[in-house]
Amino acid sequence: MVQARGFFERALKLDPDHVEALVGIASIDMSIAGFWLTDNIGEHFVAAEAALVKAISLAPHYPPAHAFLGCLQSCTNRAAQGIAECEHALALNPNLADAHAFIGVRKTFLGRAAETEADINEAFRLSPRDEGAHRWMCWVGVSKFVLGADDDAVVWLRRGLKANPNYPVGHFQLAAALALIGKLDEPRAAAREGLALVPSFTVRRAANRTALRMIGMHRSELMP
């Protein structure tokens, strides 16, 4: 991501209004915040939103900008607004797989976790070999976790990590799911895998990240 940011920054120096570069650098800031790679989560979300708002002002009909803005809004406790933004992206391009996946995971945080898998499956139908497939699988795992289907959550999270073992968030999510089904050693092993990828990770950082997304909500309250 450091390398990617460098390329996007160089592109924006050549053309400050380059829409794809604005969306690209926003995606980097969102990833840094969303994957628990920093303690300054809020700053990265603010920077990402500014870049996306500028991109949309320059190209109002560019679907990825709307989809990523929808994802960001959902990550900052605006899930309903985020879903609407992703639906707008799909109105512009019905084949935008990311938008379907973003809608699916955001439904989990609106208490509609039972609907998440269908949206993720639609994303897979449109892009079965998508580079983000590992995230999508883990998002289904989180929805199962929220629904109390902990065994299913473990299955989906393992699938996601098999697709990409370098996804740190997935390891921490798997550790939580394994702990809930009564495992002892496996959660520790999963957590160690995540820490090997992000040594600076702390529970406080995760709590701050989650607080932005689900203020005052508990697992039991998200179940249908």
Image: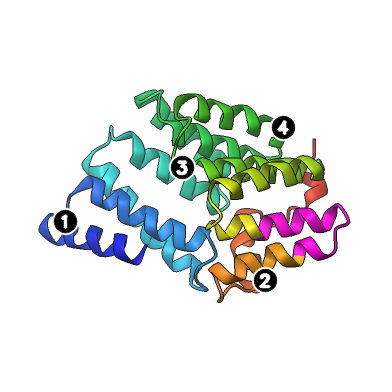
Q: Which residues are magenta?
A: 172-187
> Residue 185 vs residue 83: left or right?
right
- Rendering coords of residue 55 (x, y %): 27, 46
Going from N to C along the chain, the mark reached first, 3 or 4, is: 3
Q: Position of residue 95 (x, y in %)?
A: 40, 25
| Mark 1–mark 4 distance (CA, rounded to whole Å) | 42 Å
Indicate the amino acid at tag 2.
Answer: Val
For the rendered model, the colour scheme is: rainbow
Element at label 3: helix
Which residue matches tag 3? 70
Residue occupying image coordinates x 50% and y 31%: 100
Q: Measure how far apart labels 2 and 1 are at the Cα level.
A: 37 Å
Residue 75 horizontal/vertical position (percent): 54, 52
Identified by mark 4, the residue type is: Ala
Residue 207 seen in this snapshot: yes
Q: Earlier in the sequence, mark 2 or mark 1?
A: 1
The label shown at residue 203 is: 2
For the residue carrying disc 4, how many other residues have a C-alpha within 10 Å: few (<14), some (14-19), or many (20+)? some
97 relative to 74, above or below: above
Q: Quadrant of residue 59?
A: top left
Give the labeled residue for mark 4.
114
Q: Is residue 181 magenta?
A: yes
Give yes or no for contact between labels 2 and 1 (Cβ–Cβ under 8 Å).
no
Q: Which mark is residue 16?
A: 1
Magenta part, dominant SS: helix
The mark nearer the N terminus, 3 or 1, is 1
Q: Tell us which disc is closer to us: 1 or 4.
A: 4
Residue 109 visible: no
Kindly indicate whether the residue at mark 1 contacts the one at mark 3 (C-beta within 8 angstroms): no
